[in-house]
Amino acid sequence: MRIIKAALLGLGTVGAGVYEVIRHHQEQLQELVGAEVQVVAVLIQDENKEREVANDVLVTNDIKEILAIPGLEVIFESIVGAEPANRHVDEAIERGCHIITANKEMFAKHGDVLLEKARENDVQIGFEATVAAGVPVIRTIQQQLQLNKIERVQALLNGTSNFILTEMRQKQLPFAEVLKTAQSLGFAEADPTNDVEGIDAFYKIMILSQLIYGEQPEWATVDLKGIASVPEDEIYHSEGRYKHMAELKKVGNHVQASVQPVVIDDQHPLYSVEGVDNAVVLETSLAGTIMIQGPGAGSKPTASAMLEDFIHIFQTNKAAVLN
Ligand SMILES: NC(=O)c1ccc[n+]([C@@H]2O[C@H](COP(=O)([O-])OP(=O)(O)OC[C@H]3O[C@@H](n4cnc5c(N)ncnc54)[C@H](OP(=O)(O)O)[C@@H]3O)[C@@H](O)[C@H]2O)c1
């Protein structure tokens, strides 16, 4: 049977999830793509950490060793931050590898250039996991809404923020206490800045902007506020519900975006989206208003999005080979 050689860049929450899903779904993957999927290498930062990978997997902090592996076909990228992820992905594309990424900061900043480069090199980039993890927003837009114009997007793209706002309102608890609970439950990072300041949701809505409108607004023009800016009393006593809303629309020739806490009433589709869930409302020209909802973070949901991307890429390639 044909073997597809894969490397994982990053073996944290997401990378370890991808490794496990590949290991436990080998039979289904073989049926779906007609090949055995072999993880041959992982890129990490700290060589002294214990890793739960098979002995024959190369574990290294040197990307050159990985990109030199003969016949490497696909990279699953889940490291943190724009660099060095962007440089690694760029080099892997040049080497002819398909890319599947979960890294929203890297993709918001460099996705357009990387997609162009991938086209030139005849490889594909899957980036479903960069926005709302396992909730299939990207592919719904790419494949199911091609004739439709997307007139507006309203979305809850940060599970930590939604969890904190929900708990604060329901239990009338202070921000700091709920943040600690979120951290102890694994919903928030030790450093929660990107989540509670709205930066994580900002990157995601920029990726949607690029996908839907082919451009992003000037970053400095986007109203960006996190949930930490809302007075606690307002969250407890507001008539509606505070939600951390990312919004995107085209006004004339300009794309407008905002990421901020807003109050919505019970008529709004996002009103009942509570806890760690993400949801995206798409106002479309033909299909009407569509909402997609689900877990927007976590090891399994994110790995799910990455493996679905993998299957899509390799099924397309399999069909091309057979024709
Ligand atoms: N966690 C989620 O639910 C989620 C959901 C969607 C998207 N994402 C995105 O996925 C990415 C990974 O998130 P995560 O939660 O898995 O992070 P994580 O648990 O902190 O893991 C990051 C991994 O990347 C490695 N790494 C970091 N910097 C590196 C560098 N410069 N060179 C080589 N390896 C490096 C780390 O190595 P060591 O193991 O040696 O420290 C670790 O294995 C991020 O971009 C995040 O925004 C995460």
Image (cartoon, rainbow, N blue to C red):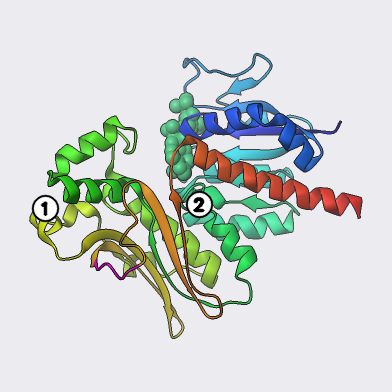
Q: Quadrant of residue 179?
A: top left
Question: Mark 2 or mark 1, which has the lower sequence index?
Answer: 2
Q: Residues within 10 Å of mark 1 (few under 14, many from 20)?
A: some
Q: Position of residue 295 (x, y in %)?
A: 44, 46
In the rendered structure, the answer to whether residue 134 lies left or right of residue 174 reads: right
At 15% from the left and 45% from the top, the residue drawn is 171
3D distance between C-alphas at marks 2 and 1: 30 Å
Q: Is residue 18 above or below residue 141?
A: above
Q: Which residue is mark 2?
A: 135
* Screen quadrant of the C terminus: bottom right
Q: Position of residue 219 (x, y in %)?
A: 37, 64
Q: Mark 2 falls on what kind of element?
A: loop
At 34% from the left and 33% from the top, the residue drawn is 186
Q: Residues within 10 Å of mark 2 (few under 14, many from 20)?
A: many
Query: Where are the magenta residues, as a range?
Result: 264-268
Magenta segment, principal secondary structure? loop
> Which label is found at residue 232?
1
The one of 315 and 123 positioned closer to us in this rendering: 315
Q: Quadrant of residue 77?
A: top right
Q: Is residue 30 above or below residue 217?
A: above
Q: Position of residue 43 (x, y in %)?
A: 57, 29
